[in-house]
Amino acid sequence: MKKRFYRFAWNCCKRCKNGIDQLQQLFSDSRLDPWRCAECGSTEVAYQAWLDGNTDRFLSGPNDRDDLWCDVCMENTSQVRESELMRNTVEPWWEQQTTDKQREAVTGLRADDYDDFQDYCHIWWNRQSNDEKIRLWRQARQTEETISD
Ligand SMILES: [Zn+2]
């Protein structure tokens, strides 16, 4: 009876802990502002961590995010928060590094059809989600890499 109670309490605690972990994940920065690979923008990133051998409780992770695994790149890359990637890389790429030709290809708009083509591009861009903006940035980078190879 005593053993059964302990097993019940243990399983109950594990379920509560899993529930709390899920709640923490739901409201954590990682969900609102996930870690992404700085090279490709993927959220399929990982790191190795130490867990308590008995409870599987998280003990510690890496000290920095400079040399960690990306499943898409299939190598170690830096990881950055999505907000940082958008602010420092994806938005500047769109604002400063895309040509009219690239913008036509991305937006489906034709520069000749608009007097204020850049304004329409700006409006179009701001309607896209971060996921979509990152996808377009990654696609453009892959195209550049293919051309330069
Ligand atoms: Zn990557």
Image (cartoon, grey):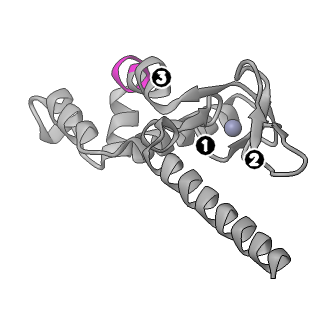
Quadrant (top left/top right/bottom left/bottom right) for the N terminus: bottom right
Q: Nearer the viewer, residue 141 or 126?
A: 126
Name the residue: 18% across, 37% down.
123
Tell whether label 1 touches label 3 (CB within 8 Å).
Answer: no
Q: Quadrant of residue 143?
A: top right
**Highlighted magenta segment, given as a residue range:** 92-96
Q: Is the CB of the residue bearing disc 2 within 8 angstroms of ligand 1?
A: yes
Decide whether residue 93 is among the magenta residues: yes
Beta carbon at label 1 within 8 Å of ligand 1 = yes
The dot on residue 84 is 3
Three-letter residue code for mark 1: Ser
**Residue 70 image point, x, y percent:** 74, 40
| First along the sequence among labels 3 and 1 | 1
**SS class, disc 1:** loop
Residue 110, how many percent across, how many down? 24, 43
Three-letter code, disc 2 = Asp
Disc 2: CA contacts within 10 A as few (<14), some (14-19) or many (>=20): few
Q: Does the segment drawn in magenta span residue 54?
A: no
Marks 1/2 in contact by CB < 8 Å: the verdict is yes
Mark 2 lies on residue: 71
Q: CA distance from mark 1 to mark 2?
A: 8 Å
What secondary structure predominates along the stretch shown in magenta? helix
The amino acid at mark 3 is Glu
The residue to which callout 1 is attached is 42
Q: In what element is the residue under mark 2?
A: loop
Q: Nearer the viewer, residue 146 or 4?
A: 4
Q: Earlier in the sequence, mark 1 or mark 2?
A: 1
Q: Is tag 3's residue or tag 2's residue first in the polypeptide sequence?
A: 2
Residue lying at 38% horizontally and 44% vertically, measured from the top left = 105
* Quarter of the image where one finds residue 17: bottom right
